[in-house]
Amino acid sequence: MATASLNETLLSYIYRRNQINTQITQHQNSKTLAAAESADLADWKNAKYQALRTQCKNLFSTTYVNSSYVDYTQIPEYKEEVEYIDSYYEAEEEDMTNWENALENQITTLSVELSEIDSYTESFKSMLSENAKNDYNYAEGL
């Protein structure tokens, strides 16, 4: 009976270990996705800057030709849009960083639990082996 109980406990730990490995894999995949989204966000920012430059250069050459502005970077529309793009980018980047940190914390927590389960599993395997030896030795003594 003790062997069956130990075996059942061992199997439950193995089942939990498999669940944890699946969760860790899912979190690592999410981290990869977060890195790709960060790259997409940087591409978005560069594309917005490029479109803004083109638009403001055209605006400067048509509207602000005889003004006190030296180039398109001094016109109010450009400054406002740059501030908007930068603030949006920074907010999204902060959200991405928080998401990546949360994923990393979850991976760390699961890894610690996985280490504990591995040590318990080894302990139960050892107990099962010892019980099997004792049962064999007891049966030989009869």
Image (cartoon, grey):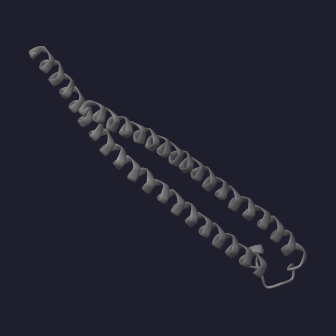
Residue 102 locus on image (x, y percent): 48, 59
Work out which quarter of the rendered image holds the C terminus and state it. Answer: top left
Q: Is residue 29 above or below residue 68?
A: above
Q: Nearer the viewer, residue 62 or 109?
A: 109
Query: How many dots with numbers?
Result: 0
Instruction: Name the quadrant containing residue 53.
Output: bottom right
Residue 121 locus on image (x, y percent): 30, 36
Q: Residue furthest front?
A: 142
Image position of 61 (left or right of 94): right
Residue at x 51% of width, y 46% of height:
28
Residue at x 30% of width, y 45% of height:
116
Q: Is residue 44 above or below residue 118?
A: below
Instruction: Name the quadrant containing residue 129.
Output: top left
Q: Residue furthest left?
A: 141
Q: Is residue 132 above or below residue 93?
A: above
Residue at x 81% of width, y 71% of height:
56
Q: Residue furthest right?
A: 62
Image position of 32 (left or right of 54): left
Residue 70 locus on image (x, y percent): 76, 78
Q: Nearer the viewer, residue 86 or 14?
A: 14
Q: Nearer the viewer, residue 136 or 89?
A: 136
Work out which quarter of the rendered image holds the N terminus and state it. Answer: top left
Image position of 46 (left or right of 54): left
Q: Nearer the viewer, residue 41 or 60?
A: 41
Residue 124 locus on image (x, y percent): 26, 35
Instruction: Name the quadrant containing residue 119.
Output: top left
